[in-house]
Image (spheres, rainbow, N blue to C red):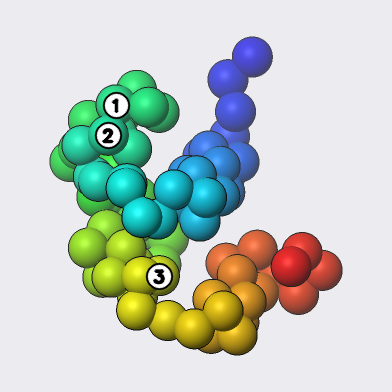
Amino acid sequence: EKLSTVQNFSAILLFLQNNYKTATLCNVAEFFKYSEGYLSRLFKRNLDMNFTEVFLFGRETTEDERTKLKELWYGKEKK
């Protein structure tokens, strides 16, 4: 069964959260079987940031800031 775009994007964000030290656009796209271009457009459309901006933000933030970002991405009920 194919997941919705929202579910897929949530899975991508979770993947990045768990693999932020080693993730690249190429290996994330490969893991989810997307082209790099399509994955880039998903980020821009859903977060108004490109992959690099999201990725760098995740790497350069404190745990408290990442928690706040997760709340923005997933809603306050998931932490």
Q: In the picture, residue 35 is in which quadrant?
A: top left
Residue beneath label 3, please?
Answer: 58
Residue plotted at (34% across, 23% down): 33
In front of the other: 39 or 60: 60
Q: Position of residue 64 (x, y in %)?
A: 60, 85
Q: Which of the two discs, 2 and 3, labels the residue nearer the N terminus?
A: 2
Image position, residue 17 (x, y; %): 51, 56
Inspect the image, locate mark 3, and give the three-letter code of the amino acid beneath it.
Answer: Gly
Q: Which one is nearer the viewer's eye here, 64 or 47?
A: 64
* Residue that badge 1 annotates: 30
Q: Quadrant where the N terminus lies?
A: top right
Element at badge 3?
A: helix
Q: Nearer the viewer, mark 1 or mark 3?
A: 3
Q: Is residue 73 positioned above or below 22 on the image? A: below
Q: CA distance from mark 1 to mark 3?
A: 20 Å
Look at 76% across and 75% down and name the residue there.
Answer: 76
Amino acid type at circle 2 is Asn
Report the side of 71 relative to 39 (left or right).
Answer: right
Q: In front here: 61 or 47? A: 61
Q: CA distance from mark 2 to mark 1?
A: 5 Å
Residue 44: which disc? none
Residue at which label 2 appears: 27
